[in-house]
Image: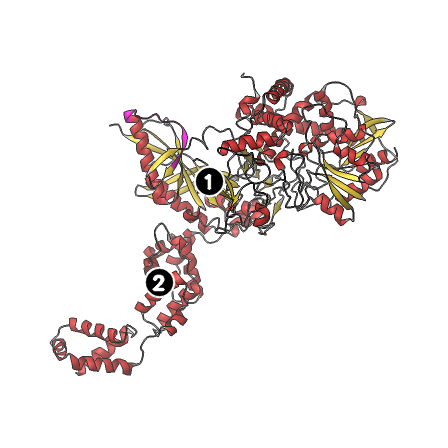
Amino acid sequence: MKEYEIVMGLEVHVELATNSKLFCSCSAKFGADANEHVCPACAGMPGMLPIANKRAVELGIAASIVTNSEITPVISFDKKNYFYPDLSCGYQITQLYAPICRNGRVEIETSKGKKDITLKQIHIEEDAGKLVHSHGVSLVDYNRCSVPLVEIVSNPDFRSAEEVLAYLEKLRALLSFAGVSDCKMQEGSMRCDVNLSVREKGTTAFGVRTEMKNMNSFSAIERAIEYEAQRHIDALETGCEELVQETRRWDDNAGKSFSMRNKENATDYRYFPDCDIMPIVVTDEWIEKVRATLPESAHDKYARMTGELSISEVDAKIITKSKRLCDIFDALMAHGLPVKDVVTWIVTELLSLDIGENKSYDDIEIDCDKLASLISMTNKKVINRTVAKKILALVYTDNVDPETYVKENNLGMVSDTGAIEAIIAQLIAENPNSVKEYKEGNAKVFTFFVGKTMKQTAGKADPTVVREILARMLDEA
Amino acid sequence: MAKNTAEMYEPMAKLSLDSETRAWADDIIARLEGEFEKMEKVDTDGVEPLVTVLDLKNVLREDVSSQLVSRDTLLENAPEEYDGYFQVPKTID
Amino acid sequence: MKFMMQSCLMVKDTVCDGGSKILEGFKSPLSATAYEKCVAAGMEFLGLVTPFEFGIDSLFCDCPDKDGTIDAILEGKCDFVLCNDVYGKMSRMAAVNGLVYLAGAYGTVSRFGIMQTVSSMDRVGVLCKKAEDGIKVLETISGKDEKDGSMLDTEKYDYSAKCDKVKAVKADEVEMKYFDLLPAVFYTLASAELCNNTNRYDGVKFGYRAPDVTDLNDLYLRSRTEGLGKDVQIASMVGCMVLAKENYEKWYFKAMQLRRMIRDYYWALLTDADVLVLDAKCDCGDKFRQLALYALAPLCGFASAAATLDGKPVELVCKPGKENIMFSMITEG
């Protein structure tokens, strides 16, 4: 069999973190009931005119900056015509002729080392609505219709699924840290279409290209690439199927891609400039203003953590991989907690939480004030660590208030040394053989006594205190 | 050059013209093609296309969200509505 | 003053069908800014008048001499009617019927709440009997509106000042450059924009939906074909044609370039002279050229007026800022 090379280009759609939509003032927030965030304009009714959202343009500039792109001095918007129920106006406002930027570059790192992925362009456009299929009909929700997004179009620089995933991780970090988007794949605020072709290794001509849509997670993207590449190779090897340039829909349950014959293929979108939206001049001053107000990047955060905060490189890397974890880190630091505790709590406790399948740490929703109070209660020895861990899970799942919960369930640490001494005295009296073994030098017996004592206090004693008292009393016995 | 006909563009515009209108449209298209030839002869090299009638720049709004109409008002005009959604025949992906 | 509006201008909680079956029973969720301004000025709204479809019908056929809008004034139902006039049809009909039609320059009257047809040419105008009334109404409805992104900055216009010295030129006294090209440029731009703006009428969200549709494509095809008028259908064919990939550069892009050349030329011409006088009833027989004559003003963003001068129906065109001069010509008869 010949050796093949996969060639891929990516189109990544990222919804911008604005309050309102791109051309009307409807809320852009995720999660409302169907059609709650819709006005006559984004429902396609006549009479309203598009006025561009300044913040959306600024987030477009921010996306251009973090991807090292060349920003277009004067940008404009164009109309793209097609009929589909999720598109209320029968056209989408996008950027074809003067997009926000071109010629970007994103550095990725894989097992094979570092590599630059080059970007063709980034353009700002309106998102489409959502279709729900039910009882033999389709239902349309325009809440997402006209929510601003940027489409990041790469050149065909990818050669493996690993590179694709590394790029997506990198983009997510760059954009989420810059506040451009929350980049949540499961809420659809980050989506990825993969253009894939296959060619014999060593050749330069591109093979027939297919575009795959509808991958809802990183792992689905990986599976889709593996499947589609194999389909191409099989077609070339056996001739069992003729490859055609087309758009295909990935079905993750079936583990297959299917041709989208009806919607996407062979359409003339009849792009033309939108005369209702005035050109937007993006001056150097404006770009610098956006640059100056960009939040700290993952790279800078990492430098700060490993530098002045003396956090280990391993821990800093874990935390800075996720914008959400960094936000939690900053919030806990703002509570004045020691760096060491904050790091330990994030890296060991928070990351061992069961957050469910198909979720990343970017999705952790937790009340940082409550988390801080939990850590502080542990530090002050109000509760011990075992209890704290249990409460952490409850803060995450049920948003319980740690202080109230400890009080109501009487989980406060037994700090009355008299009570602990009484328990230990009784244990010594009940287990003379074990005491004897201890005296003979069997260290394991000590652990046995610690366990017994903790059990008697229902796990609420401070293990350190228990150890101290136990050592003293065993020696005295 | 292929002659343009209404029929070529009907699917694009999601229209199905009756034969009379189609003949009328074809007649207009044929005459316009003649007109367009005059247009093509004019030298417009380097002329910036006029897109917006006024020479305005940077007409932008602040990112403030507001609700203009209620969902009930919005759905009042829907030909078919179901549970807060606009209903259409099943779309096939 | 009492007024009516063409139903392609919208009034909240009122059925506004724009004269189209596709908007059968459409209850508007908003009101046009021009309407709000009139009401705020104490003018009494009497109701809607049905125009040709969206106010743009007869784009491709002979324009009749009058319609319901003209009748509303002739029959004395009201003092004025607010209209949308894309290519001068209202203006022409007004002149022929001895009425007055005034439209401010593009960007002086808000387009919010008018059913968009040809976005770069849509202009709200006033149809009335007396020029003085029209001027007063135009003053009332003009002025910047944040809800229309292509407006001049002026908050308030004053059209009351009269001018004695008017330098008016007739079309046959000056070189009407690009005159032969106007129809092609106009139809290219207008058809594409109209085609695009009427995509929204698809039977999905509001308005007419064909009965017993079998599938989605059937819903689109039949709702639009049964609901939209012939002019919109033909314009859609032309619009698709000029925007199609293989034609875009040579036709659409070219037309936008020519539009700039046309604007610049007539801008210069009307800097020198004040008012250009066009014959509203030229019987040149060439439909294209005739229509293009009317299209001239909106095509280039000028203000325009229709009136009868020396017993002849005429259309007047001037540059923004020279409206007072042009209006003086009408009030003096």
Toward the front, the furthest residue is C212
Residue A91 place in picture, x, y as percent: 55, 36
Q: Which residues are magenta?
A: A237-249
* Vertical relation: A40 (above or below) A419: above
Seen from the viewer's position, the closer of residues C266 and A262 is A262
**Element type where label 1 sits in the image:** strand
The mark that comes first in sequence, 2 or 1, is 1
Estimate how packed mark 1 is, as few (under 14), some (14 to 19) or many (20 or more) residues with alpha carbons within 10 Å.
Answer: some
Report which residue position mark 2 lands on. A393
- Residue A58 falls inside the magenta stretch: no
Q: Is residue C291 left or right of residue A255?
A: right
Q: Which mark is residue C309?
A: none
**Element type where label 2 sits in the image:** helix
Seen from the viewer's position, the closer of residues A295 and A137 is A137
- Residue A238 falls inside the magenta stretch: yes
- Amino acid type shown at disc 1: Val
Estimate how packed mark 2 is, as few (under 14), some (14 to 19) or many (20 or more) residues with alpha carbons within 10 Å.
Answer: some
Q: Which mark is residue A137?
A: 1
Task: Please give the chain letter of the residue carrying mark 1.
Answer: A
- Amino acid type shown at disc 2: Ala
Task: Please give the chain letter of the residue carrying mark 2.
Answer: A
Please give the count of numbered marks on the rendered protein. Answer: 2
- Please report the residue visible at 72 percent of the width from the left and 43 percent of the height from the top: C34
Name the image quarter holding residue C28.
Answer: top right
Residues at marks 2 and 1, common chain? Answer: yes
Question: Does any portion of residue A97 appear in the rendered image?
Answer: no
Residue A399 place in picture, x, y as percent: 41, 63
Is there CB contact under 8 Å for labels 2 and 1? no
Q: Is residue C113 left or right of residue C277?
A: left
Residue A257 place in picture, x, y as percent: 36, 35
